[in-house]
Amino acid sequence: MKTRRRNLSGDRLTTTTRRNTRSKTSENGRGNSLPFPIDLIMEIFSRLPVKSIAICRCVSKTWASVLRRQDFTELFLSRSRTLPKLLLAYQKDGDLFFYSAPQPQNPDENSSSVVATYHMKFSFEADFLGDAFEISGLDQGLLLPLPRVKTRRVKSMSLFGYDPIDKQVKVLSMSGSYGSSIPVAEEYQIMTLGTGKLSQRMIDCGRILRYYPHFEGICINGVLYYLSVDISTASYLLVCFDVRSEKFSFIEVEKFLFDGTMVNYNGKLGFLLSGESDYVDESSTSVNLWVLEDTHKQEWSERTFVLPALWEEDIVESAMLGFVGMTGTNEIVMRPLSLPGRPFYLIYFNIERNTVVRVAIQGMNGSEYDHVHIFLDHVENVKLL
């Protein structure tokens, strides 16, 4: 009986052949493996979708070990960033349905539609989809229904951010009650995800703020930004929470920014408005972008982008549009605020080419559902699988 064996060398996995019976072994003699260097194996696996990666992790301990390596996680994420997607979640009654669609890159008049692919459904109790429920996205490819906060306060709200140095995702939760006509944040808690144990710890904000952040926050380069009001001074604030150090800092802002939509503009915080309004309609002539140029010096710049001449006639018609955000290729994305009997679509305004394109989202009809969440530049991430 002849046996041919390849010895394990470095990060290489081995194959043993005995006559017509093929047996695959690994370093510990168990599970399946391939006779290729691990870097080549990771390259192959990195081309699979997230769902397939999750299945492959269950094949054997060897595969699970390879697919949980930090360098594989980073490889998968970097590849996903080259093909960003639209992520859509619509809410109907007690269910959330998740879809993804190719994100148009510099769309033109030929990019008239994309097809959404259904992924999964989350079901919740009806009352959970009220004020206590939120969905948040993150620039590291994560999207989570935020956990309930352990508190005796009446109201709570959570946001999460990413620390790119320690590569940690943290949830910042604020809780308050209705002790007065203006609710105040009385507790701040922080929780680190992906550590195997969800433990909450209290932190100090240092100022007396409203119990909720105004609208949604955004995390850029390790800083979580959101708007709030200082109760003691009645000043409008941009709250800056450093995710790594867990320290707060504050920038006073004009009230009109509270009507803006926070965006990541080339690695800086920006606010999108139309004049001082949070929507665009057929009478709008331009879009304004306020950019925080220097956090420490608290310096801002304003850019005004004039809408094309055919804006009213061919694009908007009678719809009222809200801002979704900006893509990594500097396109302002807008969505109709109501869709009475019409297919779901997005408007892409390229600020460099001064072009506007309407892109229909096929495969789901947003007009039938209570609320649609839209996330731009979404990338798949295996970090928390």
Image: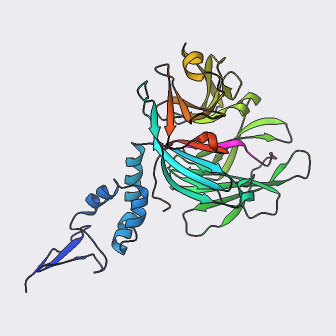
**Residue 71 % position (x, y):** 38, 58
Q: In the image, is residue 37 part of the stretch drawn in magenta?
A: no
Tell me which segment is drawn in magenta: 207-222
Nearest the viewer among 207 and 324 is: 324
**Relative to residue 38, is residue 322 drawn left or right?**
right
- Figure coloring: rainbow
Mark yes or no: residue 174 visible: yes
**Relative to residue 166, is residue 62 drawn left or right?**
left
Which residue lies at the image location 55% right of the left edge and 45% below the top edge? 88
How many badges with numbers are in the image? 0
State whether residue 311 is above or below residue 362.
above
Mark yes or no: residue 307 visible: no
Residue that protrudes farthest toward the bottom in the picture: 1
Q: Quadrant of residue 108?
A: top left
Quadrant (top left, top right, bottom left, bottom right) of the N terminus: bottom left
Which residue lies at the image location 28% right of the left edge and 81% below the top edge? 29
Which residue lies at the image location 21% right of the left edge and 70% below the top edge? 9
**Residue 116 % position (x, y):** 48, 44
Nearest the viewer among 196 and 223 is: 196
Which residue lies at the image location 7% right of the left edge and 83% below the top edge? 2
Residue that protrudes farthest toward the left in the picture: 2
Residue that protrudes farthest toward the right in the picture: 180
Q: In the image, is residue 213 part of the stretch drawn in magenta?
A: yes
Residue that protrudes farthest toward the front in the picture: 341
**Residue 189 % position (x, y):** 71, 58
Q: Quadrant of residue 303?
A: top right
State whether residue 122 is above or below residue 355.
below
